[in-house]
Amino acid sequence: MITVHNSFVSIDGSVRYLLRLQDGEFVEALRIPRDNRVTFCISSQVGCAHGCTFCLTAQLGLVRNLSADEIVEQLSVLQGFGSREERFSVVLMGMGEPLANYDNVLEAIRFFHDDHGLKMPMSRITVSTAGLVPAVRRLGKEVLFPNLSISLTGVRNCVRDELMPVNRKYPVENIMEAVRELPPQRRKRVMFECVMIKGLTDSVEDAEELSRLVRGMNVKVNLIPLNPAEEIPFERSGEDAILQFQEVLIRNGVATFIRKNRGNDVSGACGQLMKKSS
């Protein structure tokens, strides 16, 4: 049984939960209210093995996978803190790499979607990945296909190799090839996410290269300002640089959004989850 060990309320209304698992391990999850709906951000692993240098979760290393029941139970626990009638979405963007825990994540998604489960439309379920190409291809062949969010961040292999070591095995061009193999209706459900890091991922040249990479795919791009921390040796891009990056993408016909960071003041924003008890 999962229990709430502690919770932390942000000034923006988001809540970070430190959840204790039955074996004494901890994961984190978030409840993010937005107007008339709620997004639940849940974890798929305790820690993460992929070592992204801009992410605090990566510093924990991988402890273990979560079972399908543990993934589902996180949502049940978080729903208990609000009205169950609220319109809600689920994103597997918490701790861990969901596609490295493929079978358990897919079993949980089936429960979320099933008529005997939560009856959620697949359009309100999102899986995030650092770009595990074989798993992306496998997911593309499933009967059920959630929204797929791919953390690209650096668009040049020389930069992405340093920021995301997984790129040395699955470089940018392989990720693009895997997405292009998806049927058109499924490609529409793909979003590339780029963490905006000052001087590394935010140049006009990077924006032009990203535009070239996704040309004709009909995908979306989400720009995420880096959430800085003492343990991370990078700075967030300036607002002007992010807006200029977005302008280049839009000019090239790429649907592009800038994510509004939520829960920063309680260490609950993207890349900040580290089992913190305070």
Image (spheres, rainbow, N blue to C red):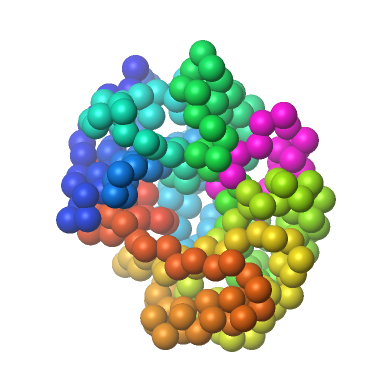
Please state the horizontal and vertical placement of residue 80, each as a whole percent of the image: 26, 26
Please state the horizontal and vertical placement of residue 114, each as a whole percent of the image: 56, 20
The residue drawn where x is 63% and y is 49% is 189
In the foreground, 19 or 59? 19
- Residue 85 in sight: yes
67, above or below 244, in the image? above
Left or right? Give the position of 22 relative to 100.
left
Left or right? Give the position of 156 relative to 27.
right
- Residue 129 in sight: no
Q: Is residue 132 magenta?
A: yes
Which corner quadrant holds the N terminus? Answer: top left
The residue drawn where x is 62% and y is 81% is 251
Q: Picture quarter containing residue 73?
A: top left
Q: Which residues are magenta?
A: 128-147
Please state the horizontal and vertical placement of residue 171, each as a whole percent of the image: 73, 62
Q: Is residue 231 magenta?
A: no
Total numbered labels = 0
